[in-house]
Amino acid sequence: MKILVPVKRVIDYNVKILLKADGTGVETANVKMSMNPFDEIAVEEAVRLKEAGKATEIVAVSVGPSGCQETLRTALAMGADRAILVQTDTETQPLAVAKILKALVDKEGPTLVILGKQAIDDDCNQTGQMLAALLGWGQGTFASDVALGDGSVTVIREIDGGLETVELKLPAIVTADLRLNEPRYASLPNIMKAKKKPLETVTPAALGVDVAPRLTTLKVVEPAKRKAGVKVPDVATLVDKLKNEARVI
Amino acid sequence: MTILILAEHDNAILKPATLNTVTAAAKIGGDIHVLVAGKGAQGVAEAASKIVGVSKVLLVDDAAYEHALAEPLAAFLVEIGRNYSHILAPATSVGKNVLPRVAALLDVAAVSDITGVVSEDIFERPIYAGNAIATVQSRDGVKVVTVRTTAFEAAGPGGSAPVETVSATGNPGLSSFVSAELSKSERPELTSARIVISGGRGMQSGDNFHLLEAIADKLGAAVGASRAAVDAGFVPNDYQVGQTGKIVAPELYIAVGISGAIQHLAGMKDSKVIVAINKDEEAAIFQVADYGLVTDLFKALPELAEAL
Ligand SMILES: Cc1cc2nc3c(=O)[nH]c(=O)nc-3n(C[C@H](O)[C@H](O)[C@H](O)COP(=O)(O)OP(=O)(O)OC[C@H]3O[C@@H](n4cnc5c(N)ncnc54)[C@H](O)[C@@H]3O)c2cc1C
Ligand SMILES: Nc1ncnc2c1ncn2[C@@H]1O[C@H](COP(=O)(O)O)[C@@H](O)[C@H]1O
C-alpha cells in the first residue's frame, strides 16, 4: 500500500513575519523556511504506518519553487522513500494544489493521502478537503488517531465539542492535527541517505493543471495593534480595575 | 443575489455561530437563506426562521445528515448551491470540514475565516496566525466562504421566514459516523462566552485546573487552555485556544500561566480586555495584556477566587 504525503514549504513558525512595504504580501526573501508543522506530523504518521508494516511506500510531494527540494529532502530524511517536486513560481492556492495532487494520485495510485490540516502561512485549511472532493474519496480531517483496517480506515477527529470517530472507505484522505503524533527529528545518517533518494521534478503543465490563482490578493496589511496595558501590583487592584475601570465583571 | 448559509446545530439546538454568519451575509447584501441539514431538526429550522434578515429556511431531514459528515452534506450543498451567489458557513469544525469540499466540487476557490466584508466579492481574512490581514477578491461564480464568528455581531431575533422542506440527495457511502466523545460542561461555550479564563503549562496538572474552574464559576466564564496544556493532557483538545484551536474574543480573557506564543495570541488577541497572570515579567503575553499581574499563579488564583 502506497501513501502520498503533500508537504508545503512555509516560513518557519518561529519567525516573526515582515510585511512588504508596498502592501503586496509577506517578505519571504532571506527568511528561514521550514516544512509546515502539520506536514511533519503527516510524514511521521506515514512513516509509522510503514514501520508497522501497513504501508509499503511513502511518496512526498511539494508544489512550489525549487526551494521546496529542501523540504522534500527533510521528508525523505524522516523516512519517505521518494519525492516529487511540482515546480512552479506561481503562488499556489489550495484548489490548484488539490488539482495537482489529484493528477499525481491518478498516476501513483496511493491508498491513503495524508496532508496537514492547515498551512500556517495562508491558514486556509482547505487542500485535503478539496482533494477528497476531486477524487470522490472520504475525508478524515483534523485527525488525532488513524487506524488502518481492511478496506477501511478509522479516524478520530478533533472537533469543536470534543472528539469524533468516523470510518472511511479506502482509498481515503486524512488531514493531520497537532496531537496525531510527535514528529521525529531526522538523524544525521538519515539526512545523508536522503540525499541519494530519488527526487523527480515535474511541471503543473505536464500534469495538465492550470495553477492560475482564483483569488486575487489586493493588499496585505498589519492587524490593528493593541495599546500597551499596565501592570497591577496585586489581586485586589486587579479586581478593582476590572470592576471600576474596565467594567467587565 | 441570494446567499445560502449552512446552519450550525446539533439537531436540537441552533448554535449561536449561525447568528454571526447571518450578520456577515447581511454585510454582503441580498436575500439570505439558511439551510438546516440534519435528522429530526425541525426545531432548529424554526429557530433559524426567527433570525432577523433571513428570508427562507430550507430543511433537509435525513439520517445522512445527522452527524454533519462532509461527504453527504457537500453532495447536497453542491446540488442546491449552484443557484446561489454565495455559500457561507461559520468557520467551525463543521464549516471548515464541509465548505472546501463544496468549493472544489463547484470548481471554485474557498475563502476561509473571513473577518471583514468589503464588497460582495472582496473579503478580509487573517493570514500567518493573524499577523497579517489579507484583502482578497474572488471572481468565481459562487463564492464559498467561512466566517470567523468573533468578527461579526450575532444577528438578533425578529424574523419570520417560511420553512421549506427539501428532499435529500442520498449518501455517497464513503464515510460513516462511529461515535463522539463530547466534553460535557455546565459552563458557557468557549467561543460564545462573555468571559474566558485559560490555563497554560504553568498550571502544572489537570487537577490544578480546579483553581480556574472555581473562578470561572463565580464569573460565569468558560475555561480554555493553551496547546501546551492540552498536549500535556491537563484538559481535552476542545479547550485549545489559538491559531489552530478556537478563536475567541470575549469581553474579558484571563490568561494564566501562558507565555503568549503567537499561535496562542492568534486565538485571543481580539478580546476586549485581556488579563495576564504569569510569574515571568518578560512573558510575551504581557505585551497584549491590559492588566498584567506578575506573580505565582498558585498564590494569585485562590486570592482571586476569594475576592470575587
Ligand atoms: C503549528 C503550530 C500550531 C500551534 N497552535 C497553537 C494553538 O492553537 N494554541 C496554542 O496555545 N498554542 C499553539 N501552538 C504552540 C505554541 O507555539 C506554544 O508552544 C504554546 O502556546 C505554549 O503554551 P504555554 O504558554 O502554556 O506554555 P509555555 O510557553 O511553556 O509557558 C508557560 C508559562 O507559564 C508561566 N508559569 C509557569 N509556572 C508559573 C506559576 N507558578 N505562576 C505563574 N506563571 C507560571 C511561565 O512563566 C511561562 O510563561 C502551536 C504551535 C505550532 C508549531
Ligand atoms: N504547495 C503545496 N505543496 C504541497 N502540499 C501542500 C501545498 N499547499 C498545501 N499543501 C498541503 O495541504 C495542507 C493544507 O494546506 P492549506 O489548505 O493551504 O491550509 C498542507 O498542510 C499540506 O499538506
Image: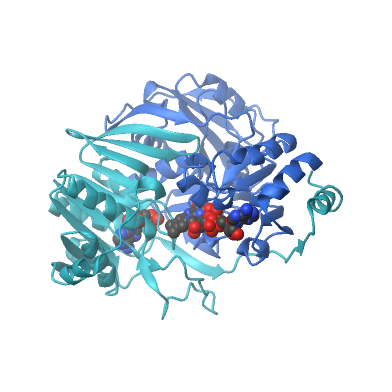
Chain colours: A cyan, B blue
In the picture, measured across the screen, residue B99 lies left or right of residue B17, that is: left
Residue plotted at (29% across, 49% down): A131
Q: Position of residue B58 (x, y in %)?
A: 50, 28
In the picture, measured across the screen, residue B257 lies left or right of residue B146, that is: right
Residue B123 can be seen in this image: no
The answer to which image quadrant residue A155 occupies is: top left
Foreground: A76 or A100?
A76
Q: Position of residue A248 (x, y in %)?
A: 78, 46
Tally of numbered tags: 0
For the C terminus of chain A, give its image quadrant.
top right
Q: Position of residue A151 (x, y in %)?
A: 17, 34
Q: Is A111 rendered above or below residue A241?
A: above
Residue A226 can be seen in this image: yes
For the N terminus of chain A, give its image quadrant.
top left
Residue plotted at (60% across, 41% down): B208
Q: Is B63 rendered above or below residue A163?
A: above
Foreground: B251 or B229?
B229
Foreground: B82 or B76?
B76
Q: Residue furthest right?
A: A244
Foreground: A107 or B296?
B296
Q: Is A148 rendered above or below residue A194?
A: above
Give the image quadrant in which the ligand numbered 1 is located: bottom right
Q: Position of residue B50 (x, y in %)?
A: 64, 28
